[in-house]
Structures are given as C-alpha cells and as structure tokens.
Image: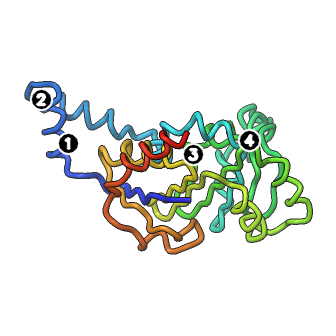
Amino acid sequence: MRGLRVSHIRKGVAFEIYKLENRLGADLSPDAVSAWLDAVQPLWLSEFSRFFGPLFPEILQRTWLLCDPGAPLLIRPFVDFYDMEEPVKVLEDLEALEIAAGEHWRIVRGEYLLRVANHIDEDELIFLGIPSRSWDKFWRCCERVETMAEMKKVARDFCDMAFCSYEGIWGAFFSDVKLLARTFFHCSEHFIVLEIEEGVGFDGDWLTSGRASCPAFPILLRRRERNG
C-alpha cells in the first residue's frame, strides 16, 4: 500500500486567506477571517476527522482492527461514563458494534470508528481496515490469535486501508491510488502532507521516511482509469 503522512501543522494562514480572497474576488474583513478559521478548524473535531472525514463512507464499508499500544482510551471512549451506576445507551450501542476484543485491540464494524472519531486519544494508534471481500478469510485466520502483535500480522495480509497516529501526526495507507489522491488533495489544502516512500508500511519508519508531494498523482489516476 502507498501512504501519506499528514501533519497537524497548518500551512501559512496568510497564504490560505490570500487564496480564499482570490476565489471570492473580494477582501475579507477581520471578522470574516476569524469566522473562516473557526470553520476550517472547529474545536470539536479530532485530527482524524479533520484529515479523513471525506473517507468516512469508505471507512463505514470496512471492518476495523483497532490497536492501541499505549492505553485503552480508544478501546473504551467516554471513560467517565463507565463509572455511572445506570448503563449509558451510547456505550451499549457501541458495544453492539464490537465483534471481538483483546488486550489493546478490538475488532469493530465501521460505524464504531465513525462514532468515536472525535473522542479518541490520537497519541499512538493503528487502524487496519478489512474489506468485506476479505472478511471471511481474515476471521478464520483470527481463530487462534490473541495478542495485538499477532492480530496486526494477520490483518496486514488482508487490509486495504490503514491509519496510524503519533502525537497528532497521521499516516494513511491505501491500496487504491484514487483514495490516496483524494486524501492528498483534501489534506494538502490546509496542512502539510508528505508522501511516504514506497515499501514503508504502517509498521515501518513512516514518521521520517517521506518526500515532497507526489507530482505523478494525476498520471497514476489516468493510468488506473485506462486500465479500468
């Protein structure tokens, strides 16, 4: 799979405002600039939602192995709710979307990941998406697997989309070059995006092994369209 590294560091705000003013054909007032910044980066969005929101339909169509090597915050979002005596419906609904779980890993339906997207600790996470065509084979391979490392090893043979995070920096990996290109063009509008070098997977040195954005994306897309 080919990948992108998306940094939460924003591009120069002045340049972005200049581009927006060019599009509108008018100068923006200070109030308008402030409103625009609030809209671009609202406080209630996680970096995951901000970067990969356009991919939510694709995320919904997959089953996900969620790995949280650091702490079980991803596994149990809304932690404070678990201290309440009466069950909280949002937690019951989430648990209904879980398929299996172990120490620091959880297999869930795509809807689960969308529901917790704005409530995750984005320090050190790995999400591996299994398409429906591969689910049965993947599940059979998981029957005797228990540890997170073993689950990741199995999932890497079946997943076609993956996300990794480290302190707010996200890596996104795709088998489909069109999804790669869509994500690049969406994220690079406001944030710094690098292409991860070929051969560096989500278990590799994706944080440092990157290069300036790929100028061949349009060529790759045309080639894929010609080949069907």
* Local SS, label 4: strand
* Local SS, label 3: loop
Q: Nearer the viewer, mark 2 or mark 1?
A: 1
N-term mark: 2 or 4? 2
How far apart are labels 2 and 1 at the CA level?
Answer: 12 Å
Q: What amino acid is labelled 3 in the image?
A: His
N-term mark: 1 or 3? 1
Task: Give the labeled residue for mark 1.
Answer: 16
Residue at 52 percent of width and 62 percent of height: 123
Q: Quadrant of residue 132?
A: top right
Q: Nearer the viewer, mark 3 or mark 4?
A: 4
Task: Give the labeled residue for mark 4.
Answer: 109
Q: Residues within 10 Å of mark 2 (few under 14, many from 20)?
A: some
Q: What amino acid is labelled 2 in the image?
A: Leu
Out of 94 and 206, give the one closest to the viewer.
206
Q: Is residue 113 left or right of residue 211?
A: right
Task: Give the labeled residue for mark 2.
Answer: 28
Q: Position of residue 199 (x, y in %)?
A: 53, 70
